[in-house]
Every structure is written in C-alpha cells, then in structure tokens.
Image (cartoon, rainbow, N blue to C red):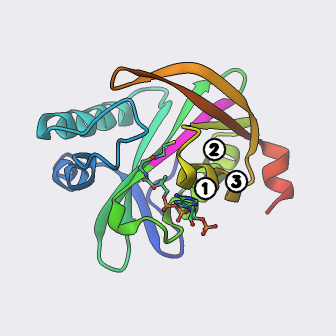
Amino acid sequence: MELPLQTPRLLLRDFVEDDWGAVHTYAHRPEVSRFMPWGPNSEQDSREFVGRALAAQVASPRLVFEIAVIWRESGQLIGGCHLSVQNQTQGVGEIGYCLHPDFWGRGCAAEASGALLALGFEELQLHRLQATCDPENKGSRRVLEKLGMQLEGRLRQNLQIRGQWRDSLLWSILENEWRGGR
Ligand SMILES: CC(C)(COP(=O)(O)OP(=O)(O)OC[C@H]1O[C@@H](n2cnc3c(N)ncnc32)[C@H](O)[C@@H]1OP(=O)(O)O)[C@@H](O)C(=O)NCCC(=O)NCCS
C-alpha cells in the first residue's frame, strides 16, 4: 500500500517512533477514550501503541495499517486512523479513527476515512469494509453515515469498557456501493 497519502487538508503516513509524544497529547485525555476499551493512556501506553504500529508495518503480508494523521498546514500530528484486513481470503477489512479534540468537528475523520476506503477498495482490493461505534458516540456515527456506510445492526455487549459491558453498532460499505457513491 502506497503511503503517504494526501487529502485536501491531511497527510496520512506511517507512524515513526518519535510520534508517541504527539499521540500522547490526545490519547491521555479521558474524553478521547470515553467510548474505547483502552485509555486514558499512560506515557508507556502511548509508546507501546506506536511500537505496535511499527511492528505492523514490517509484517508480511501487512494486514494492519495504523496511520498517522497530519494537519498539512502545520505538520502537526492530529490523530490516527487504521485499516485492518480481517479476512484476506474473503476481502473483509475494518476501519477506525481517533483524533485530537482540538480538531474535532472539522470533517477531519471523514476526510481521513474517505482515503482509507479508497485504499481498502482500490489498493487492497477488498470487498467489504466495516466499522463499529458505541451507540452513544454520535460524532463517530455521523462520520460513518457521511462515508456512505450502512447500519447493519447492534452487537450486544461485545465490548467491556472500564468494567461496563457496552453494545456496538456495526456498519459496513461494499466495494460496489463505494464505487457507485463516488
Ligand atoms: C469520533 C471522531 C473521530 C470524530 O472526528 P471528527 O473529525 O470530529 O469527525 P467529522 O468532523 O468528520 O464528523 C463529525 C460529525 O459528527 C457530528 N457530531 C459530533 N458530535 C456530535 C454530537 N454530540 N451529536 C451529534 N452530532 C455530532 C459533527 O457535527 C459532524 O457532522 P457534520 O459534518 O454533519 O456536521 C472524534 O470525535 C474522535 O476522535 N473521538 C474520540 C475517538 C473515537 O471515539 N473514535 C471513534 C471510535 S468508533
């Protein structure tokens, strides 16, 4: 897969080791991991996240793409997004995203994820991309709608977040739907 990628305002590139500090500026904030099974991160957690991202870069075949989201105007790392191939034979993958709160509400997650869909369907030749979000994560839900994903249903208590069982909404888009919607 060819990285880096450019969108109108963002650069999507592989993480490098030094990125852990920029990751930590958002990953330690409780509002960022409110709907996530991880966090709030310690410094060690953020270092380990970047370490896992680096390890995934050299896996062969590479099935996990943890990607740093850079605000092009300033060069600032403003978050991360990911695409993971869950079933290579069946062409099924999953996407996700996490941004610094200073950049929420500016369309950045939708912009970055739009590039992930193109990578999944065009370069990795996947058939289906899916995503999950917490039923109360209204921002994430709206991102998935804006991407043209369809709501498939509700996974019951599939995730434990800080000791509480949570449901997840399951969303997907198929390759032909993505091509038709462009
Ligand atoms: C979820 C997240 C990635 C969204 O990023 P973002 O860059 O703000 O997303 P976008 O700006 O592309 O779109 C957000 C949309 O949700 C809407 N939205 C945000 N909060 C909302 C709320 N509480 N109620 C209703 N709509 C809301 C925005 O208005 C926007 O819609 P619009 O473009 O139609 O106006 C960001 O909030 C985040 O990083 N959260 C923490 C990590 C996380 O939860 N990741 C997702 C895990 S499933």
Quarter of the image containing the C terminus? bottom right
Q: On residue 143, which mark appears?
A: 1
**Residue shown at 15%/38% (left/top)?**
42
Give the magenta range: 92-97
Magenta stretch, overall SS: strand
Please report the residue visible at 21 percent of the width from the left and 55 percent of the height from the top: 25
Q: Mark 1 falls on what kind of element?
A: helix
Q: Nearer the viewer, residue 97 or 126?
A: 97
Q: Within the magenta stretch, is there residue 94?
A: yes
Q: Position of residue 115 (x, y in %)?
A: 58, 57
Disc 3 from disc 1: Cα separation: 5 Å
**Residue at 28% of width from left, 68% of height from top?**
76
Write down the residue under mark 3.
145
Distance from Cα at disc 2 to Cα at disc 3 = 18 Å
Sooner in the amino-acid sequence: mark 2 or mark 3: 2
User: How dense is the environment of label 1, judged by Cα within 10 Å: few (below 14), some, or many (20 and up)?
Assistant: some
Amino acid type indicated by mark 3? Glu
Q: Separation of disc 2 and disc 1 at Cα?
A: 17 Å
Q: Are circles 2 and 3 on residues that touch, CB within 8 Å?
A: no
> Is the CB of the residue bearing disc 1 within 8 angstroms of ligand 1?
yes
Residue that numbered label 2 is attached to? 120
Which callout, 2 or 3, points to the residue nearer the camera?
A: 3
Q: Quadrant of residue 135?
A: top right
Using the rendered view, name the quadrant where residue 36 is placed. Answer: top left
Mark 3, residues whose alpha carbon is within 10 Å: few (<14), some, or many (≥20)? some
The residue at 54%/37% (across/down) is 134
- Asked if labels 1 and 3 touch by Cβ distance under 8 angstroms, the answer is yes
Give coordinates of residue 22: x percent, y percent: 21, 56
Instruction: Please say if 21 is above or below 8.
Output: above
Q: For the view shown, which residue lies furthest in the bottom direction? A: 73
Residue 126 shows up from this direction: no
Q: Residues within 10 Å of mark 2 (few under 14, many from 20)?
A: many
